[in-house]
Image (spheres, rainbow, N blue to C red):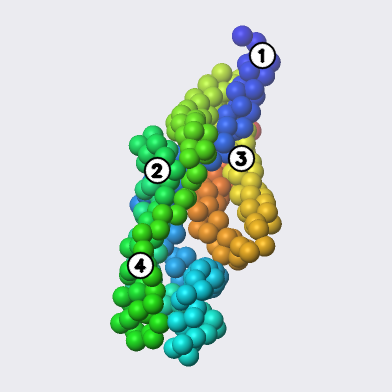
């Protein structure tokens, strides 16, 4: 094979490899990061102390109070502002953080079982255990309306039954892509370097392409955040949604910086070794 043909083939293999890098990172993050309950709960745990999330929880709980409970609160001399302040104060307790983790664990486990085909119907979460914990904590804190907090078995649909089939197909595709895309990227990169007429240049090109893939991944995460926050309904807190998005994509942002830094480092090292080799041959 002529050097020109080897160079062209190497460039094609390396370009395809670098193109697969950001897509492989996205697929691996979705299949192995978001699909792991422990990692998901760990990523969401700090949000229990985020002011925007706490405000959103307080507003949601306050809005969910029924007319009957509101009448009882007025009898006790408490109004909507006092109720919101009490709920907002509750979000600063250890009981809320424990309930937050448990709610995320329960919800994620239910969704994961549905994606694996273990739940034929819609994905629902029973709010009774969470409500019971809230009432116990409020009663222990001496909040007057604690005894009026209803603890009923209320199933909240997280994923409708009509969406399950489409989500399962997408999840299976992600599981396949999470393994094959990174593997294919590595094989194509090694093949491109192996057939190259000048392997140092091939290594440099691969490293720069990997750095570019990391940069594109970071840009995609930023654009995704903008689109997610701007397309929300008016009643949803954009600050809380942004905090949740940032928590879930923290691993992706780290991977993008690692790819960028690693690619630039390897490319710089390859260039330096090339200069050193030419300087030794010059005399």
Q: Earlier in the sequence, mark 3 or mark 2?
A: 2
Real-space CA distance between mark 2 and mark 1, rounded to the nearest whole angstrom:
48 Å
For label 2, the crowd category at 10 Å Cα-Cα, with few meaning under 14, some 14 to 19 and many 20 or more, is: many
Which one is in front in this view, the residue at disc 2 or the one at disc 1? 2
| Residue on which disc 3 sits | 213
Real-space CA distance between mark 1 and mark 3, rounded to the nearest whole angstrom:
25 Å
Real-space CA distance between mark 1 and mark 4, rounded to the nearest whole angstrom:
73 Å
As displayed, is residue 193 above or below residue 205?
A: above
Q: Earlier in the sequence, mark 4 or mark 3?
A: 4
| Residue on which disc 4 sits | 151
Which label number is shown at residue 219? none
Which one is in front in this view, the residue at disc 1 or the one at disc 4? 4
Q: Earlier in the sequence, mark 1 or mark 3?
A: 1
**At 42% from the left edge and 40% from the top edge, which residue is drawn?**
121
Question: Is the Cβ of the residue at disc 2 closer than 8 Å to that at disc 1?
Answer: no
Name the one closer to the observer, 33 or 141: 141
Question: Is the Cβ of the residue at disc 1 closer than 8 Å to that at disc 3?
Answer: no
Question: Is the Cβ of the residue at disc 4 closer than 8 Å to that at disc 2?
Answer: no
Q: Secondary structure at mark 2?
A: helix
For label 1, the crowd category at 10 Å Cα-Cα, with few meaning under 14, some 14 to 19 and many 20 or more, is: few
**At 46% from the left edge and 87% from the top edge, which residue is drawn?**
75
| Residue on which disc 1 sits | 5
Q: Earlier in the sequence, mark 2 or mark 1?
A: 1
> In the rendering, at what x and y percent does residue 145 appear?
40, 82
Q: Secondary structure at mark 1?
A: helix
């Amino acid at each position: 094979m002529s050097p020109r043909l080897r160079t062209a083939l190497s460039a094609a293999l390396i370009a395809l490899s670098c193109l697969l890098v950001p897509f492989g990172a996205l697929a691996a993050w979705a299949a192995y990061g978001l699909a792991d309950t422990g990692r998901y709960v760990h990523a969401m745990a700090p949000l229990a102390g985020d002011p925007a999330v706490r405000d959103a929880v307080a507003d949601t709980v306050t809005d969910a109070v029924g007319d009957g409970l509101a009448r009882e609160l007025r009898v006790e001399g408490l109004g909507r502002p006092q109720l919101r302040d009490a709920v907002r104060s509750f979000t600063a307790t250890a009981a809320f953080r424990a309930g937050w983790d448990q709610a995320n664990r329960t919800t994620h486990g239910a969704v994961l079982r549905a994606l694996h085909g273990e739940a034929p119907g819609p994905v629902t979460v029973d709010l009774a255990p969470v409500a019971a914990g809230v009432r116990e904590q409020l009663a222990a804190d001496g909040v007057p309306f604690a005894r009026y907090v209803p603890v009923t078995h209320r199933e909240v649909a997280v994923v409708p039954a009509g969406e399950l089939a489409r989500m399962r197909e997408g999840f299976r595709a992600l599981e396949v892509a999470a393994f094959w895309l990174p593997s294919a990227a590595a094989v194509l990169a090694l093949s491109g370097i192996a057939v190259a007429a000048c392997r140092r240049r091939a290594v440099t090109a691969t490293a720069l392409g990997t750095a570019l893939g990391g940069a594109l991944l970071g840009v995609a995460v930023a654009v995704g955040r903008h689109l997610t926050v701007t397309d929300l309904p008016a009643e949803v807190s954009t600050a809380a949604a942004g905090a949740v998005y940032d928590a879930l994509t923290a691993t992706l942002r780290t991977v993008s910086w690692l790819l960028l830094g690693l690619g630039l480092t390897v490319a710089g090292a390859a260039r330096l070794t090339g200069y050193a080799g030419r300087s030794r041959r010059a005399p």
